């Protein structure tokens, strides 16, 4: 109730009242297309490198640089687009990323030489860095009880993208070459531009900016499409509830445990604050532990996920002369598309496992178990194995790392307030891109250099450390609304 007794409701109240419906399905389809686009652009790296190396006579380090520069671009883009979307809106954030990704993707196919290909792929990475913006945008339309399940469904678009790219490469590469693969892979990001006019701004962001009338228009549109009604009363922001002195925990004021749990009350974040202020807020006393741990886990997750994608190619590469003669592939023309296709299908059971565990056992336990199981699957690969066994072990490791990555993208936005959510997830994603930059040097450089044992042991250490860091997260966000306090879930987590 307002001071005059008028009923009030927040964006969270409205979303919960209206429920999940057709509007959220449309938002899912749009955001999912962006996720497919990013998955395809990342998956094709495992095919383009070997093809260009054979064509232009590149060294293993030059081949790995084709992948690394994409992550350099993503490192810059993930933070930059996160700041843009927190300051100017989610829509503007993913509009720019779609333009950059599609444009640079098509130009990559026209690259006349190695240097131009490197430049254009770096620009593609810059655009792909905006992926977390779409994730945050979609998340802010989902009622809390449905969020875990539908974020897993959202991650399924990534899996579809990787499998589709593997299928596309299997068909296109032997017949038409790598340039056509680049062209076809850039099409999904162009689709985002075609339907951009229909994409609404996040009502949660609009409320934070004080644009309640615009937020109400979006909520009314959601109600109309879902065949539901808005709650009775006046739309208010969570900041207004706090200023009114009501004892209602809000996501910007009590994200972490209160002082009696050993934490300070978070400072109020100015929605107009710039990128430096947002970053300082992420490193403030009440958020610094979660932020640092999140950075480490994102690094480990990205390093291991993209490393496994590249390992699948390199360990099944007919041109790899480091294997014992009896274990070499008979196909000396390039990668084994069949084995890459098979291991890519591991993402489906990974999604199912994350969907089953994320709301039953919590975000932290689900991620930690998957990291440690991934270590077990990779361990036999410290020595050369027969091709079928290698494929099976990589399949199991891919299941685990896909599940942990899926839960990570559910957990990360839940620990930050709206004012710095995209910046927080974007910055963590930037740390992940550093892992992506380094992993080609290990998965390509070390394997080509006949140091497979050293490569796998490095993977083991990084994945294990990431699993330990997951257990050190101070909060468990399972079942929490984006505007709820985490103090209750933290107490539950500490007592378990």
Image (cartoon, rainbow, N blue to C red):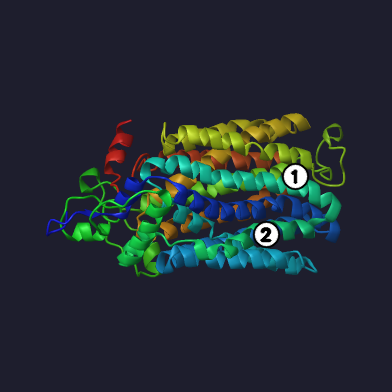
Say which mark, if any, is on residue 187.
2
Q: Which mark is residue 314?
A: 1
Taking the image as shown, residue 165 lies to the left or right of residue 197, namely right
The mark found on residue 235 in the picture is none
Q: Is residue 91 above or below residue 250?
A: below
Mark 1 closeness class: few <14, some 14–19, many ≥20 residues within 10 Å? many
Nearer the N terminus, badge 1 or badge 2? 2
In contact (CB < 8 Å): disc 1 and disc 2: no
- Residue at the spot x=46%, y=53% of the render? 138
Q: Quadrant of residue 194?
A: bottom right
Q: Secondary structure at mark 1?
A: helix
Whole-percent x, y for residue 389 in the image: 73, 29
In the picture, measured across the screen, residue 125 lies left or right of residue 89, that is: right
Q: CA distance from mark 1 to mark 2?
A: 27 Å
Quadrant of the rendering where the C terminus is positioned: top left
Question: Can residue 278 be spotted in the picture?
Answer: yes
Residue 189 figure quarter: bottom right
Question: Tag 2: Cα neighbours inside 10 Å, few (<14), some, or many (≥20)?
Answer: some
Residue 51 percent across, percent down from the top left: 80, 54
- Residue 282 in sight: no
The residue located at (81%, 44%) in the rendering is 320
Rendering coords of residue 272 (x, y %): 35, 70
Of 393 and 86, which appears nearest the observer?
A: 86
Q: Position of residue 354 (x, y in %)?
A: 51, 36
Q: Is residue 7 above or below residue 304?
A: below
Q: Relative to residue 43, is residue 373 depicted above or below?
A: above
């Amino acid at each position: 109730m307002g001071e005059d007794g008028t009923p009030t409701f927040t964006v969270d109240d409205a979303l919960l009242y209206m429920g999940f419906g057709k509007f959220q399905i449309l938002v899912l389809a749009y955001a999912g297309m962006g996720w497919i686009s990013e998955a395809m652009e990342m998956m094709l790296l495992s095919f383009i490198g070997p093809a260009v190396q054979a064509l232009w006579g590149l060294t293993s380090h030059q081949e790995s640089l084709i992948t690394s520069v994409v992550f350099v671009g993503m490192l810059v883009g993930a933070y930059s687009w996160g700041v843009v979307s927190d300051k100017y809106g989610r829509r503007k954030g993913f509009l720019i990323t779609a333009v950059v990704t599609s444009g640079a993707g098509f130009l990559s196919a026209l690259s006349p030489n190695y240097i131009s290909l490197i430049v254009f792929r770096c620009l593609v990475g810059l655009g792909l860095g905006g992926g977390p913006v779409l994730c945050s945008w979609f998340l802010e339309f989902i009622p809390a009880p449905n969020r875990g399940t539908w974020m897993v469904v959202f991650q399924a678009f990534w899996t579809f993208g990787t499998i589709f790219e593997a299928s596309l490469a299997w068909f296109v590469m032997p017949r038409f070459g790598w340039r056509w693969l680049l062209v076809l892979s850039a099409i999904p990001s162009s689709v985002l531009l075609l339907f951009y006019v229909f994409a609404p701004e996040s009502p949660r962001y609009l409320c934070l900016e004080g644009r309640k009338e615009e937020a109400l228009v979006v909520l009314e549109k959601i109600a109309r499409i879902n065949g539901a009604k808005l709650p009775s009363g006046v739309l208010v922001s969570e900041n207004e509830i706090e200023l009114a002195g009501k004892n209602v925990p809000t996501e910007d004021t009590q994200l972490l445990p209160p002082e009696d749990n050993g934490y300070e009350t978070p400072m109020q974040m100015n929605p107009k604050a710039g990128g430096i202020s947002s970053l300082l807020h992420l490193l403030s006393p009440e958020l610094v532990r979660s932020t640092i741990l999140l950075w480490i886990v994102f690094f480990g997750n990205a390093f291991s996920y993209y490393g496994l994608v590249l390992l699948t190619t390199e360990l099944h590469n007919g041109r790899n002369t480091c294997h014992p003669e009896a274990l070499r592939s008979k196909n000396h023309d390039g990668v084994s598309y069949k084995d890459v296709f098979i291991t890519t299908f591991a993402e489906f059971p990974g999604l199912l496992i994350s969907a089953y565990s994320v709301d039953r056992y919590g975000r932290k336990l689900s991620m930690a178990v998957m990291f440690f199981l991934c270590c077990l699957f990779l361990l036999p690969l410290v020595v050369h194995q027969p091709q079928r066994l290698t494929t099976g072990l990589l399949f199991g490791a891919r299941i685990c790392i896909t599940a942990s990555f899926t839960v990570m993208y559910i957990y990360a936005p839940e620990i930050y307030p709206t004012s710095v959510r995209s910046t927080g997830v974007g910055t963590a994603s930037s740390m992940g891109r550093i892992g992506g930059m380094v992993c080609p040097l290990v998965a390509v450089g070390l394997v080509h250099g006949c140091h497979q044992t050293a490569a796998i042991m490095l993977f083991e250490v990084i994945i294990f450390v990431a699993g330990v860091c997951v257990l050190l997260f101070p909060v468990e966000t399972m079942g929490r609304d984006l505007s709820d306090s985490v103090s209750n879930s933290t107490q539950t987590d500490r007592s378990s």
